[in-house]
Image (cartoon, grey):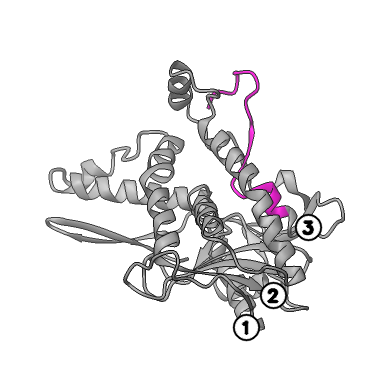
Amino acid sequence: MDSKIPNTVRVQHMAPQFHLRNFSPDEKKRSIYAFDKVTQKSFLAAINRVAYEDYFYDDTEMNRRARELGAPTDQIFESFFAELEAATAPLISSILDRVRSDSTPRCTLAEKFKLAEWVAAQIVRTRAFREQILQYEEAFKRWQLSRYLPPHILDGFDLVPVSEAAIHAQAGFGPIMEDIVRLLYYGCFLRIGRGVAGSDLITSDNPAVRTKGGLGEVGNRMILPISFDCAIIFERNTSRGIYPQGYDAGIYEISRDEIDMFNYLQVRQSYRQVFGITPDFTMVDAMIKGDPSLTLMKRPRIKVVSLPELFAWSPVLP
């Protein structure tokens, strides 16, 4: 973190503020209802004071290197997300207008690509994703060293000595994000889902949720609610790639059961906070009572299969 450099952005959001405003109950779009799974309390919060951490994407060495290379800003990843948000916000607003007016509901191929990039960014930018990457990094190094070091020595090592932000940047903002964009654009069908009156979608600090652990698994659905009454849904219906022309981006009505399922996924896959347009978090309360582990921020997010000559892992959906 380089907090002494002028014009740095201290408050860095893991869920974009313009995304959260689409779930705001007030006319000026400044507040949102939140539920904290750790404290198990709900409250009305200012949008600019939720789903953020100070200097979340910053690393002293990365910032220094960016300055040496003459980058326009040393906070390159915060800047990347800010520019992506500015470019995507008009498209999200346009989709919401189309959904609510029933005019020109279908997306173009260019819009599908932008939405794939947007959903991919919401996957890799969060604290939940960072925890998954850190657990993978530690597990992989432990597997490597376990072949040469006894357990009592291995337990004394700092297996992830590099800063969390640096590991997050190297893993998420490079090949992984590119692979996700390619999968969503070429390998998934796009749906624009419209909710039904009386059943609101919620969102969270990890807003892009999925129905299966592996993004490429057949039958997986990647769901990003973009407002309390609309969601972007990428569906993996085949193990073979599809050309982007082979998709159907028309509007479909999300059933009440689907809304309940989408909200269930938000609660389970969020890192700490869930957000909505109303203060009704009955579902969250009930889910925590049934599974108290949902209140734990540090919980297993990967599953490791270790064999003598093989290291394999898969994501775990909490």
Residue at image x 12%, y 57%? 308
Mark 2 in CB contact with mark 3 (< 8 angstroms): no
Residue at image x 59%, y 73%? 250
Tag nearer the camera, 2 or 3: 2
Q: Main secondary structure of the magenta part?
A: loop
Hey, what amino acid is under mark 1?
Asp
Stretch in magenta: 1-20
Q: Is residue 64 above or below residue 90?
A: above
Residue under numbered circle 1 = 257
Residue 232: x %, y % from top left = 59, 65
Residue under numbered circle 3 = 24
Residue at image x 34%, y 51%? 136
Dot 1 falls on a residue whose secondary structure is helix
Residue 22: x %, y % from top left = 73, 58
Question: Residue 195 — which label?
Answer: 2
**How far is disc 2 from disc 3 in space, using C-alphas?**
16 Å
**How far is disc 1 from disc 2 in space, using C-alphas?**
11 Å
List the single residue furthest toward the right.
27
Dot 2 falls on a residue whose secondary structure is loop
